[in-house]
Amino acid sequence: MERHFEPIAEYTGPMPQRATAYSAGYDIAAAGTVVIKPGKIVLIPTGIKAKLGPYEYLELVSRSSLPRKRHLVMPNSIGIIDSDYYPHEIMGQFWNIGQVPAVINAGDRIMQGIFRSYLLTDDDTATGARNGGFGSTGGN
């Protein structure tokens, strides 16, 4: 199975890396500086995409220091990057729960990516094809 991170066109920032030999997640940084006003939700570009194998996804989780130090949380708790999302840029969705604007600078580590695999039910019949991200597969 092939799984790896790639930069999007012309991105020269840091690529995701694990901090220790036993870290589950790869630290993912912001590609540019973003200001998030109090109460607002913003998508933060990362400058990267992820190549995944069949029946794999990349789980995005917030770095544990963001709520305490910057008052930022992921409004949906985690993000899911499906294998058919490639070659689109990975974005992090963050909500400022603080009282002052939060500044994320280019290169700031904002989340971790954990490669995961999944199983299907015996009667699975999914045949749809992806046409975007953030709600593109229908529903609310």
Image: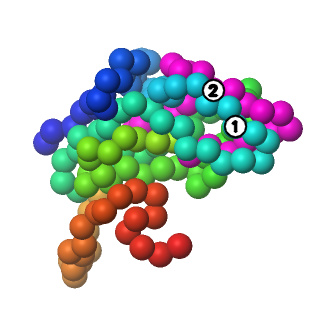
The type of residue carrying mark 1 is: Ile
Of the residues under marks 2 and 1, which one precedes in the sequence? 1
Residue 9 horizontal/vertical position (percent):
29, 29
Task: Identify the residue at horizontal 83%, vertical 33% (top origin).
Answer: 100
| 108 part of magenta stretch | yes
Secondary structure that dominates the magenta span: strand
Task: Identify the residue at horizontal 59%, vertical 51% (top origin).
Answer: 77
| 64 left or right, relative to 115 | right
Q: Residue furthest left?
A: 1
Q: Is residue 72 above or below residue 136?
A: above
Residue designated by label 1: 36
Residue 59 horizontal/vertical position (percent):
42, 46
Residue designated by label 2: 104
- Say if mark 2 contacts mark 1, CB within 8 Å: yes
**Boundaries of the magenta span:** 93-116
Q: Secondary structure at mark 2?
A: strand
Task: Identify the residue at horizontal 29%, vertical 39% (top origin).
Answer: 50
- Front in this rendered view, residue 1 or 33: 33
Residue 19 position by quadrant: top left
